[in-house]
Amino acid sequence: MTMRISLSDAQKVWFCASCEEVIEGPVTLYECGECGTVFDRENSADGNSQKCPDCNKLAAKLTAHGCPDCQEEDGCKEVMAVDADGEWVVISDATVK
Ligand SMILES: [Zn+2]
Ligand SMILES: [Zn+2]
């Protein structure tokens, strides 16, 4: 069985190397200097800030390209991928800055 994929259908998507899954897009992650918790804005103390959900202190920005699923700091990158019946097949690194 060969999977039929057309390279011309390739599109740029965000991929998390840690989850090994295509994600919607990277998020900004913050790391709390007090307790070391890593979180995104959605999981912050008030739902949309850089306040630590654990101790309510302002946290420092860790990265702008974190994974929303696994909180992996540098796991996300843009790749060229093809949608093959709902399964993303990664073809190559897009390597776009
Ligand atoms: Zn991930
Ligand atoms: Zn904290």
Image (tube, grey):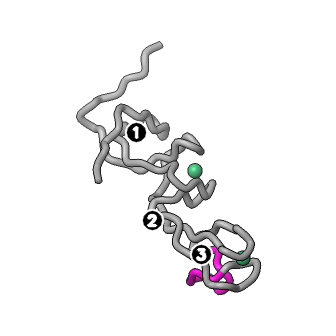
* Amino acid tagged 1: Asp
**Residue 78 x %, y %:** 37, 48
Mark with earlier residue (3, 2): 3
Q: Nearer the viewer, mark 2 or mark 1?
A: 2
Q: Nearer the viewer, mark 1 or mark 3?
A: 3
Does 81 appear above or below 41? above
| Among numbered discs 1 and 3, the one appearing first in the sequence | 3
Relative to 4, residue 23 above or below: below
> Residue 48 colored magenta?
yes
Q: In the image, which is nearer the foreground, mark 3 or mark 2?
A: 2
Classify mark 1: helix, strand or loop: strand
The reply to whether dot 2 and dot 1 touch (C-beta < 8 Å) is no
* Residue ID for mark 1: 83
**Residue at the spot x=47%, y=57% of the render?**
24
Residue range corresponding to the magenta coloring:
41-51
SS for tag 2?
strand
How many angstroms separate mark 2 from mark 1 (CA)?
26 Å
Q: CA distance from mark 3 to mark 2?
A: 14 Å
Percent position of residue 46, x then y: 65, 86
Q: Position of residue 81 (x, y in %)?
A: 37, 38
What residue does disc 2 label?
64
Q: Residues within 10 Å of mark 2 (few under 14, many from 20)?
A: some
| Apparent side of residue 39 relative to residue 63 in the rendered image (left or right) | right
Q: Which residue is mark 3?
A: 42
Mark 1, residues whose alpha carbon is within 10 Å: few (<14), some, or many (≥20)?
Answer: some
Magenta segment includes 67: no
User: Which kind of residue does numbered mark 3 sit on?
Assistant: Glu
